[in-house]
Image (cartoon, grey):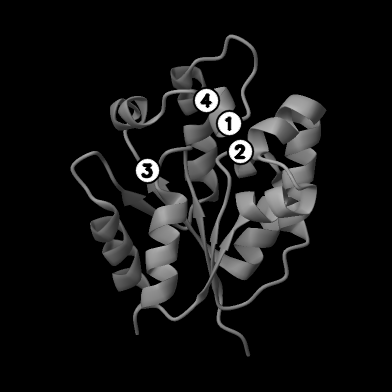
Amino acid sequence: MFEKNITLIGMPGAGKSTVGVVVAKLLCKTFIDADLVIQGKEGKRLYKIIEEIGNEKFLKLENDTLLHLNVHNSVISTGGSVIFGKEAMEHLKNTSTVVYIKVPYEALEKRLKNLKRRGVVCDEGQTLLDIYNTRTPLYEKYADIIVESDNETDIQETAMEIVKLFEE
């Protein structure tokens, strides 16, 4: 019997990677950052990969990478666009409890400046609000648990809220 994973989903800038490290440490789990797995595999930063292969191919790469991620007792921080990969999300739902770190748009607007440089999958002319409005229903659809976080909530508080849900 293996311990189920915890998968963190949410918008870019929601704090998935930072929160994930703390949650993994406190729950004695391995931490995996899906963006770093993709970067390691490709040998390039996310934004460079997206620039070179385009949004469609990047989404396929992200989907395939997470679909074939075979880990146990881990906290997995996903990229913000993971919810566009149906197969990957089904795999993560089967092997994880999926936690959506929900951050209000206003807080994300303060945190995020250059979307392209950050490696955010977006179409030409698409605004942060467009991305937020498109993705939010998908995050909610796939989430087993929703944890609210905002500018007032620090990383430690968000991590502790998640840890409390999984402590025995």
* CA distance for labels 4 and 3: 18 Å
Q: Residues within 10 Å of mark 3 (few under 14, many from 20)?
A: some
**CB under 8 Å between callouts 4 and 1?**
yes
**CB under 8 Å between callouts 1 and 2?**
yes
Q: Which mark is residue 120?
A: 1
**CB under 8 Å between callouts 2 and 3?**
no
The amino acid marked with disc number 3 is Lys
Work out whether mark 1 precedes mark 2 in sequence or the reverse, and give the earlier one.
2
Q: Residues within 10 Å of mark 4 (few under 14, many from 20)?
A: some
Give the number of the mark in front: 1 or 2: 1
Work out whether mark 2 precedes mark 4 in sequence or the reverse, and give the earlier one.
2
Please state the horizontal and vertical placement of residue 123, each as a whole percent of the image. 65, 17
Up-down relation of residue 161 to residue 154 (above or below): below
The amino acid marked with disc number 2 is Ser
Please state the horizontal and vertical placement of residue 97, each as a whole percent of the image. 51, 65
Work out whether mark 4 precedes mark 3 in sequence or the reverse, and give the earlier one.
3
Work out whether mark 3 precedes mark 1 in sequence or the reverse, and give the earlier one.
3
What residue sits 34% from the left and 52% below the top?
Answer: 147
* CA distance for labels 2 and 3: 14 Å
What residue sits 63% from the left and 90% below the top?
Answer: 1
Is residue 28 rendered to the left or right of residue 53?
left
Work out whether mark 2 precedes mark 3 in sequence or the reverse, and give the earlier one.
2
The amino acid marked with disc number 4 is Leu
Give the number of the mark in front: 4 or 3: 4
Q: Which residue is mark 3?
A: 102
Q: Which mark is residue 85?
A: none
Q: Which residue is mark 2?
A: 81
**CB under 8 Å between callouts 3 and 1?**
no
